[in-house]
Amino acid sequence: SLKTKLGAAMLMPELRALKGKMDYKEHGGAPLLGLSGLVVKGHGSSDGNAVKNAVRQARIALQADLVPSISKEISGK
């Protein structure tokens, strides 16, 4: 129906933005917490771009001292 098509047309930009935010290829991976060191886990079918972004995520986490910061917060020191 026309009403449905108009509604879909209005939602499409937001849905595309949401898809981009949830795309594993854009984020590359996520840090595994609870370990002594930094591990970034990627999707099993990651392509080269996803691996590049996972390495970028690891670099950002290292520069931000993610693991020591979390350890410090948890220990209360």
Image (tube, rainbow, N blue to C red):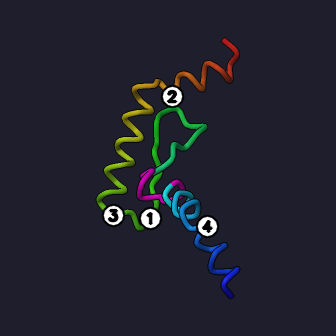
The crowding category of the residue bearing disc 2, from other C-alpha atoms within 10 Å (few below 14, some 14 to 19, many at least 20), is some
Q: Which numbered disc covers residue 47?
A: 3
Q: What amino acid is found at the position of numbered circle 3 in the picture? A: Asp
**CA gap, disc 2 and disc 4:** 39 Å
Q: Where 23 sits versus 34, above or below?
A: below
- Whole-number angstrom distance, CA of label 4 to CA of label 1: 34 Å
Mark 1–mark 2 Cα distance, whole angstroms, equals: 24 Å
Which numbered circle lies on residue 10? Answer: 4
Q: Residue 74: within the magenta?
A: no
Q: Which mark is residue 66?
A: 2
The x and y percentages for residue 24 are 47, 58
Identity of the amino acid at label 4? Met
Among the two numbered marks 4 and 1 on one chain, the one whose residue lies closer to the N terminus: 4
Magenta segment main secondary structure: helix
Looking at the image, is 21 positioned above or below residue 70?
Answer: below
Label placed on residue 44:
1
x, y percent for residue 60: 41, 33
